[in-house]
Amino acid sequence: MRGGSRPAPVALFLLAASGICAQFTAVLAGDPNDDKKAEAQPKGHTGKTILFVLLGVGAVILLSFFIFKYWQKKKREEQHARLLKLFEEDDDIEVELGLRD
């Protein structure tokens, strides 16, 4: 710890990682308390949960796709505006140099 005021980010990461690993080992070991909880839940609850998770993931993917397309459109418009400005400046230079009327 630095100065005793806050734990280092590495220490927080290791603490979080160890907690997650403990949860995985409890699930993989087949904790008997989980069996009682699973029996208490109705069977349709699992299907609804999976459905909601899939709908959420689909919504995030769809939203990401539309945001990406919007970003592409804005970037394309910006590049087009730069291109038009570039050619517009060239015309002004030609007029100033007397190459064109």
Image (cartoon, rainbow, N blue to C red):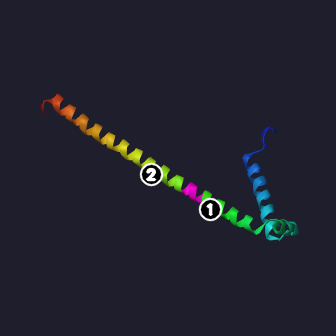
Percent across and percent down for residue 71 are: 45, 47
Give the magenta-colored segment's residue range: 57-61
Q: Amino acid under label 2?
A: Lys
Q: Main secondary structure of the magenta part?
A: helix
Residue position marked by numbered label 2 in the rendering? 69
Determine the image quadrant of residue 40.
bottom right
Position above or below: 64 against 45: above
| Viewer-side residue, 12 vs 76 | 76
- Report the Cα–Cα distance between label 1 and label 2: 23 Å
Please tell me which residue is depicted at 73% across the width and 67% down the height of the picture. Answer: 44
Looking at the rendered structure, the number of numbered marks drawn on it comes to 2
Quadrant where the N terminus lies? top right
Residue position marked by numbered label 1 in the rendering? 54
Q: Is residue 60 magenta?
A: yes
Please tell me which residue is depicted at 65% across the width and 63% down the height of the picture. Answer: 51
**Element at badge 2?**
helix
Quadrant where the C terminus lies? top left
